[in-house]
Structure formats: structure tokens, C-alpha cells
Image (cartoon, grey):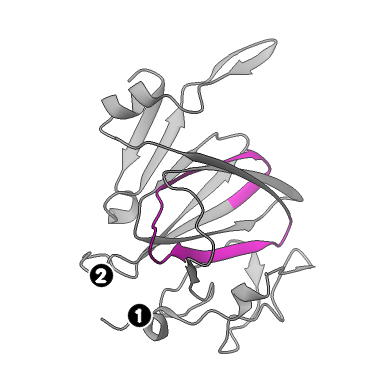
């Protein structure tokens, strides 16, 4: 397993992993393996990825918190340009850390990858002027299968870096900003409810 370093169970949440690839650099630049199935399996991570997605977002964009209802996905996420704060919230109803979150700073400089297993809500917030975000999924996209949680649900209590604003009782982004740039949310992401309203076990 010489090409990756794995830190497991981040913030005490079973299954969340930070994966850092080995960087081979010289005066010309660098090379790294962004994914190697053999190295992952040697690290005890046995996942078959079937889809690779990439998005571009500008500063102040917050995407999430999203989850899949019937076809949950494991995701391996990274940033190839810029900087984001990436968050996973444990939604596994029998988990001792249900409702707990962990956030990872992913940048083009640190090359960290964040492994988010099935059973989590996921989202990210763009801290740089522009960010290009990539992620592998172990299942295909299924239309109409997406659910979501309010990104600012006080029950979860995510602290989004550099974000200023006051909670107004909803997922609306009104009044929130980063470095003078207004928070940018999709219309659907301003309508999600909190974890207690969304799930009742």
C-alpha cells in the first residue's frame, strides 16, 4: 500500500476515511495515482466505482446536504482546483454517531480525498474564487432518488468556515456571506428540512 495513506473513522465516525496519495514531484511538476484499486483493497477498502463526476463552482456556492433514498452511493471526493469544505453527516439509523458530522478541507495543494460511505448526507462549500470538484460513485445516478437536509440545521450544527450570517429558522441562504460574497444555494437546497423533521424512526 505504498501509494496511499489512509486515516480511518474520522471524528469517531465509522467508515469515514481521509486518503492521501503519494506525490512524486521534481522540477517539472508532480505525478500521483488518484485511484488504484489494488492499493485500496490492500488498505481494506473494497469498492467498485462505476461513475466519475466533476463540477465547477464559484466562491460562496454551497451544494448539499444531499443523500440518495433508495440507491445509496459511496463517494470518493477530491478537489483538483481551489478549496472546499466537504461535509458528511451520518444518517445510519443504528449508528452510535447518527446525526454527527465531519468536515474535511479539500484543496488542490493537499490532494486529500474523502471517502464517504453509503448512509451519509453529503455537501460542500466553496472557499476559493473557483473550485473544481471530482468524485467517484459506486452506483449510477438515479433520477428522482435524491433527498436532502437543511445545510444549516442547528440540530446537526455544522460550522462552515468563513461563513457569516444568522439562522432564520429555514434553509434559506438570505443574509449569509463569505468575504462579502453572498451565499449561493440551489432553489431545492433552500427548501430541505432539518434531520428531526426529515427522519422519524
> Is residue 69 highlighted in magenta?
yes
| Residue 104 higher or lower than 41, as above or below | below
Which residue, given by chain and number where applicable, does mark 1 sit on?
Answer: 199
Residue located 69% across and 75% down the image: 176
For residue 128, above or below residue 176: above
Residue numbers of the magenta segment: 58-84
Q: Where is residue 47 in the image (x, y as percent from the top left)?
A: 34, 37
Q: In this view, does 177 lie to the left or right of 54?
A: right
Find residue 93 and name its label: 2
Q: Residue at x 39, y 57 (%)?
A: 72
Q: Residue furthest bottom?
A: 169
Q: Residue at x 79, y 67 (%)?
A: 180
CB within 8 Å, label 2 to label 1: yes
Residue 68 figure quarter:
bottom left
Q: How crowded is mark 2: few (under 14 residues within 10 Å), some or many (20 or more)?
A: few
Identify the image quadrant of the C terminus. Answer: bottom left
- For the N terminus, the quadrant is top left
Amino acid at each position: 500500500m505504498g501509494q496511499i495513506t489512509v486515516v480511518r473513522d474520522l471524528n469517531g465516525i465509522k467508515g469515514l476515511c481521509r486518503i492521501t496519495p503519494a506525490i512524486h514531484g521534481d522540477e517539472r511538476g508532480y505525478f500521483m495515482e488518484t485511484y488504484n484499486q489494488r492499493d485500496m483493497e490492500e488498505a481494506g477498502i473494497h469498492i467498485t466505482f462505476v461513475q466519475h463526476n466533476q463540477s465547477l463552482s464559484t466562491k460562496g456556492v454551497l451544494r448539499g446536504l444531499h443523500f440518495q433514498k433508495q440507491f445509496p452511493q459511496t463517494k470518493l471526493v477530491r478537489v483538483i482546483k481551489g478549496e472546499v469544505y466537504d461535509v458528511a453527516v451520518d444518517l445510519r439509523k443504528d449508528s452510535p454517531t447518527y446525526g454527527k458530522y465531519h468536515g474535511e478541507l479539500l484543496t488542490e495543494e493537499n490532494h486529500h480525498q474523502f471517502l464517504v460511505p453509503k448512509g451519509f448526507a453529503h455537501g460542500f462549500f466553496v472557499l476559493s474564487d473557483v473550485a473544481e470538484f471530482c468524485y467517484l460513485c459506486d452506483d449510477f445516478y438515479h433520477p428522482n432518488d435524491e433527498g436532502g437536509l437543511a445545510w444549516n440545521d442547528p440540530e446537526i450544527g455544522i460550522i462552515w468556515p468563513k461563513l457569516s450570517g444568522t439562522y432564520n429558522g429555514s434553509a434559506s441562504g438570505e443574509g449569509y456571506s463569505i468575504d462579502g460574497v453572498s451565499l449561493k444555494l440551489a432553489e431545492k437546497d433552500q427548501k430541505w428540512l432539518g434531520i428531526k423533521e426529515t427522519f422519524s424512526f
